[in-house]
Structure formats: C-alpha cells, structure tokens
C-alpha cells in the first residue's frame, strides 16, 4: 500500500487546527493532528514544504521505519514543531493500518484495558460562586474529576478562568479557549505571592462544598520556583488533589527533586514536552506521577507509547493533555491509545466548539465520566473538507505574562 498524497489542511472552526491527510494507492486515507497552538503555520509548512514529498511512494504500512526516517533524517532533533509534524504522519499511518485491518485503532494497540478513559473537565471561576457553579455544571455533565482554576485577588485575569474576553465569542463557557484571535499576544499580569496566599483557601472551600471524593486537579502553569512549588504542594496536601500540574518549568528536570522531596501532592508534568528524553530524569527518579504529553505533540502513537512503556517501569501513569487546541483527531488518537495502555491515568477533556465538531465529526463518546473511542475502523474521523474550507486560518496567540514590575514571566 503506497502513499500517493499527503495534504495539509489548515482550518479554523472555532480555533485554528492543522490536519494532515494521507491517501494511499488503495484509496485508504488516514488523518493526523499537527496543531501547535500559536505556531500552527510552522508545522503546516514543515509538513507541506519539507516532509510531504518524502512520503510519496513510501509503504504506508512501515510506520516505525517512517518514524525513524523522519526523526533521524531530519537531522535537527526534537522540539515541538518537528515532533508535532512526525506525530501527524505517525497518527495518519496508524489510522490507515487500522482501516486496512478493518478494526478500531485500539485493537492494534492491544485492545481495551478498561471500559472507558476517565476524564477531567475545566471548572473555573473568578470567585467562589462562579467556580462552584462551574463545578456543578461539570458534575451535571457527568464529569467525575475537575480541574479547578480560579481568579487571584488583585489580578484582572488569570490563566484557566473563563471570562467574557478570554472565552472568545463563547463568553463565559465552562471551557475557555486560551489562544485569542489577535495580531499580537495579549499581556497578562502575575503575582505569585498573591496566588500562593489565595489558592489553599479556594481548595478548602471546594472540599467543604463538594466533599472528599471528587477528584480535584490544579494547574500552576509553569509559574513557580521550585521552593514556591514545594510550598504550594504542601499547602494543598489537606485537600488530597488528584494532581498538581506544571508547578515549575521543567526543562531542568532536576528542579523537580526539591519539590518531590517536600510534598506528597501528586505531580503532573509535560504538556510542553515532546520526546522521551524530556522525561528521562523525571521518570527514572520518579519525580512525577503523570506524563502529560499527548499523541499530537510527542511523536504520535509511536512516540507516546514508547514514553508510557518507560514510565510504566516507575509506576507513572498517563495524563494526556486534551485542551481545545488538540483537535478531535488528536483526541481520538489519545483515547485509542489511552484505552489500551495499562498505565493509563486520566485524560484531559475540554469541550470543543460546536463548529469544530461539525468539521471533524464526533470522534469520541463521552459517558459515565469517561471517553470511549469510535468503533469505526481506524481513528473514526469523518473530516468534512468542504466545510473546513469555510473557516480560514486567523492569527491567534497564547497570552504572554509579566510580573507586577514588568518582568516577563511564564504564562
Ligand atoms: O492543562 N492545560 C493547559 O495548560 C492548556 O490550557 C494550555 O495552556 C493550552 O492548551 C496551550 O495551548
Ligand atoms: Co496545563
């Protein structure tokens, strides 16, 4: 089965997505998600201008060889653009192989290891009443785990909190779209001390209101120093979090040693990481409990499965990133892999814009607090290319962040 075509489709139904469509000589097509929020066109060009022609004529069944050919043949190793491009090719080839075999992709990955993949939703609120409403709305939708993000006194806007501006034209939706359509990134302000003073009281109130069972997650979004992260982890221990995410930038993986030695709050890291090497110390020294990389950003099914098999040796589980900027193609791939992995942990699940679902088709089934993959052969993608053309790309950026004194800070 030869690869005849590799088409890159950039569409923006609710937000920008980059999708790779591979067509074989047998007429079988496969889809891959190549969306990199705020840098989408870089991946589109990497695929369209440098990779597509290398795929033509290759045997579509040679997934591992193609992965290694693109990874080692690219010479310049690793990084979000390269690994998102490789992920899209890998995912599309897995889609093709499963379609050719006439079975849902997860059957090729070892079959189901559980009924469904438990998910967590994004509950948020500038103040407690709004936050409680958002948590209740997620419970009504059937979520059994929620990420809790809240405003910080004195700060006009904070990451993860839906507000009329941040939520795009949805306005106050339960899930907010972090990338805003604009010619330049929005600038936000940050005050770590105000945040550290405030967050424990929010979780105290949430536990008092919703009880001890509900799985609560929180994302510190790379903003703390290791000692501040250790303090936050300790201060949240009474509230028994499912995980505390991205507590501190982890390019220097050793930075997590200090945090890990001072708190038992479980740690999740890695949505901005894209290869197994980004996790080598984090995993081998058990500095984390959950691996956040999704199929879309870490070299596809092949790349993430390799990371998760390594993580399994250290009893570390998956916690794949699943925001609105992972497309329904990427979400479908994550759930096909997630339902097969023995060391699956939890899956992030933001609700996509309804225009997104119209273009990509429903690719996962949400019920009982979890997701099941499509039972169609392959990934189960019904991509409407005509409708996709109705939504041209629009420049959109993730915000940038500055401390009160104007110093640039992690957003
Ligand atoms: O845990 N989820 C997150 O941190 C996301 O909201 C990320 O900021 C965006 O997906 C980046 O594009
Ligand atoms: Co995050």
Image: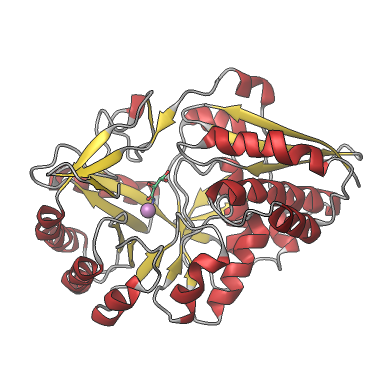
Mark yes or no: residue 113 visible.
no
Number of marks in picture: 0
Residue 361 shown left or right of residue 6 in the figure: left
In front of the other: 236 or 116: 236
Do we see residue 387 in this rendering? yes
How far across and down, in percent of the image, does residue 51 sit? 73, 41
Question: Please, which residue is most extreme toward the top here?
Answer: 390
Place of residue 190 in the rendered image (x, y in percent of width and height, measured from the top left): 18, 46
Residue visible at 43% across and 80% down in the picture: 286
- Is residue 207 shown above or below 123? below
> Which image quadrant for residue 246?
bottom left
Q: Position of residue 397 (x, y in %)?
A: 39, 33
User: Could you say where residue 408 lies in the image, as x and y percent from the top left?
Assistant: 25, 45
Q: Nearer the viewer, residue 326 or 147?
A: 326
Colour style of the rendered protein structure:
secondary structure
Tell me what residue is drawn at x 80 percent, y 37 percent: 53
Instruction: Identify the residue at image location x=74%, y=54%.
Output: 73
> Which residue occupies 23% across, 67% down?
229
| Vertical position of residue 154 compared to residue 165: above or below | below
């Amino acid at each position: 089965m030869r690869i005849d075509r590799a088409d890159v489709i950039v569409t923006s139904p609710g937000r920008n997505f980059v999708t790779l469509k591979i067509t074989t000589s047998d007429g079988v097509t496969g889809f891959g998600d190549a969306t990199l929020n705020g840098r989408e066109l870089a991946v589109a060009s990497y695929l369209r201008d440098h990779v597509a022609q290398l795929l033509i004529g290759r045997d579509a069944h040679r997934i591992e060889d193609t992965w290694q050919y693109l990874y080692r043949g690219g010479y310049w190793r690793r990084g979000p653009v390269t690994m998102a491009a490789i992920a899209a090719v890998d995912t599309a080839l897995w889609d093709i192989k499963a379609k050719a075999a006439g079975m849902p992709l997860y059957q090729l990955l070892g079959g189901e290891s559980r009924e469904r993949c438990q998910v967590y939703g994004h509950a948020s609120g500038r103040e407690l009443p709004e936050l409680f409403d958002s948590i209740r709305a997620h419970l009504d939708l059937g979520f059994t785990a929620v990420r809790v993000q809240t405003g910080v006194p004195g700060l006009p806007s904070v990451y993860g909190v839906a507000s009329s501006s941040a939520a795009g034209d949805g306005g106050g939706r339960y899930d907010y779209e972090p990338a805003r359509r604009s010619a330049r990134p929005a600038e936000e302000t940050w005050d770590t001390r105000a945040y550290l003073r405030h967050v424990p009281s929010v979780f105290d109130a949430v536990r008092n209101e919703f009880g001890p069972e509900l799985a609560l997650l929180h994302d510190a979004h790379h903003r703390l120093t290791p000692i501040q992260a250790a303090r936050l982890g300790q201060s949240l221990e009474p509230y028994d979090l499912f995980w505390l995410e991205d507590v501190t930038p982890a390019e220097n993986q050793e930075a997590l040693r200090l945090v890990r030695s001072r708190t038992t709050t479980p740690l999740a890291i890695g949505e901005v990481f894209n290869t197994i090497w980004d996790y080598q110390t984090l995993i081998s020294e058990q500095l984390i409990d959950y691996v956040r990389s999704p199929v879309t950003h870490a070299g596809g099914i092949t790349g993430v499965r390799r990371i998760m098999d390594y993580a399994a040796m250290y009893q570390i589980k998956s916690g794949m990133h699943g925001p609105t900027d992972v497309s329904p193609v990427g979400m479908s791939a994550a759930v096909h892999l997630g339902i097969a992995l023995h060391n699956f942990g939890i899956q992030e699940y933001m609700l996509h814009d309804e225009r997104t679902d119209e273009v990509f088709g429903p690719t996962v089934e949400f019920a009982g607090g979890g997701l099941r993959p499509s039972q169609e052969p392959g990934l189960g993608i019904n991509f409407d290319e005509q409708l996709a053309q109705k939504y041209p790309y629009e420049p959109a950026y993730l915000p940038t962040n500055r401390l009160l004194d104007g110093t640039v800070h992690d957003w």
